[in-house]
Image: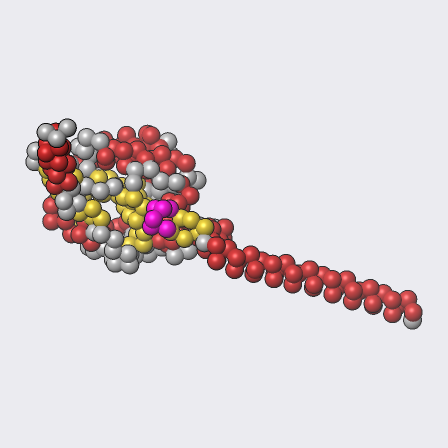
Amino acid sequence: MLLALPALAQRSGQQLAVFEGVGIEPKLGAYIPLDLTFYDEEGRPVALQTFFDGRRPVLLTLVYHDCPMLCNLVLDGLTKTLRQMSWTPGEQFEVLAISFDHRETPALVRRRKAHYLEMLGKPAAAAGWHFLTGDSTTIRALTDAVGFSFRWVPEKQQFAHPAALIFLSGDGKISRYLYGLEHDPGDVRKALVEASEGKVGTVLDQVLLYCFQYDPNENSYVANAFNIMRLGGAVTMVVLGITLFLFWRRERRRQQATLQTAG
């Protein structure tokens, strides 16, 4: 056992070194540069501004498609979440899957888009789920803007990188990060409503967002007891007010009927 410890420590040190400088530094409230130009699935240059209309939120995921495992799991998890949602990309929100490997081509991401759209089973989503590529300078400008750090590991011949969904407002402001491979559809919907500042979603979505807040320790939206109590108090006051009004109106009618009978 004593002889094995140095080897174990060495292997652990090597694994930690692989992930040195890799991670996400949240930049909530910052804006991404919408003038950056990428390439769509057909190889056409498109500015990021194309996907931001000032109203609908944008869900961004940074991946690379030659990834042996993690990125496939990220996109598989996102597809599963989108499949469970009643909302569809292109209608209430946009989705950007941008490769951070400058060597990847539009032809490759076109095949990946077809694959994930088939998995999703929502043909209308083709207009709202965009798979983009770019050059190294453009990619670095975007990843720096959202605090996404990755590095190439020569001995592994792959990238070390984090996994997260990044939610942006309709004008490119970073609103929320959800970390990990799979996400609750309710959390994704709340994050989209939050990113839109209430411009998408129903009244119920606004109520839910008021009653739930993002907890970074849970990486999820959790009940906000104080807001729920405040909302409950407000509802109670409204119900009480309506009850008193109905009682007052009934009594007034009864008094009027009594006066008319007496007269």
Horizontal arrangement in the rendering, residue 201 relative to residue 101 (left or right): right
How many marks the image carries: the answer is 0
Residue stretch in magenta? 215-220
Direction left: furthest residue = 154
Horizontal arrangement in the rendering, residue 166 relative to residue 223 (left or right): left
Asked whether residue 57 is in view, the answer is no
Asked whether residue 258 is in view, the answer is yes
Coloring scheme of the render? secondary structure
Query: In the rendered image, which quarter contains the N terminus?
Result: top left
Residue at 82% of width from left, 64% of height from top? 254
Q: Which of these two is toward me, 218 or 246?
A: 218
Residue at 20% of width from left, 46% of height from top? 23
Residue at 23% of width from left, 34% of height from top? 70
Horizontal arrangement in the rendering, residue 55 relative to residue 114 (left or right): right
Vertical order, 233 against 215 (above or below): below
Query: At which x and y percent is residue 77?
Result: 32, 35
Q: Which of these two is toward me, 261 or 13?
A: 13
Please check the rendered image and state whether residue 256 is part of the magenta-colored stretch, yes or no: no
Query: At which x and y percent is residue 16?
Result: 15, 40
